Image (cartoon, rainbow, N blue to C red):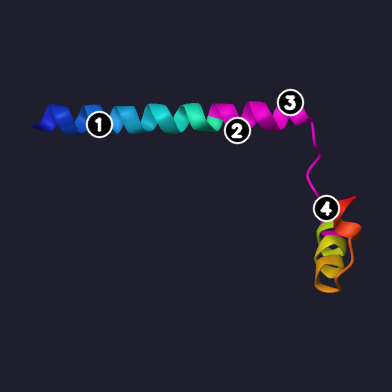
Amino acid sequence: MRKDCSMISYVILGITFLIVVIQISIYAARQRKPLTRDDINDRLLAALNGGDKGRE
C-alpha cells in the first residue's frame, strides 16, 4: 500500500515537472519581455475606461 502511494506521488511530481518545462519553453519561444508596472497600469486603465489600448 505504501509503495502505491509513493508511486502516485512520483507520477504527480513528474507530470508537474513536465508542465513547468513546457510552460518555460513556450515562454522562452515567445521571447516576450515581462510587463512593467506602467504597462500593467495602462492596460488596466484602458480596460476600465472601455478603450482598446490594452490590445496593442
Q: Which residue lies under the disc numbered 2? A: 23
Q: Which residue lies under the disc numbered 1? A: 8
The answer to which quarter of the image holds residue 6 is top left
| Local crowd size for mark 4, using a 10 Å CA cut-off: few (<14), some (14–19), many (≥20) | few
| Foreground: disc 2 or disc 4 | 2
Magenta residues span 21-38
Q: Amino acid at mark 1?
A: Ile
- Which residue occupies 25% across, 31% down? 8
Q: Which residue lies under the disc numbered 4? A: 36
Give how far apart the Cα atoms at labels 2 and 1 are.
23 Å
Give how far apart the Cα atoms at labels 4 and 3 are.
20 Å
Q: Amino acid at mark 3?
A: Ala
Give how far apart the Cα atoms at labels 1 and 3 are.
31 Å
| Local crowd size for mark 3, using a 10 Å CA cut-off: few (<14), some (14–19), many (≥20) | few
Give how far apart the Cα atoms at labels 4 and 1 are.
40 Å
Q: Secondary structure at mark 4?
A: loop
Q: Earlier in the sequence, mark 4 or mark 1?
A: 1
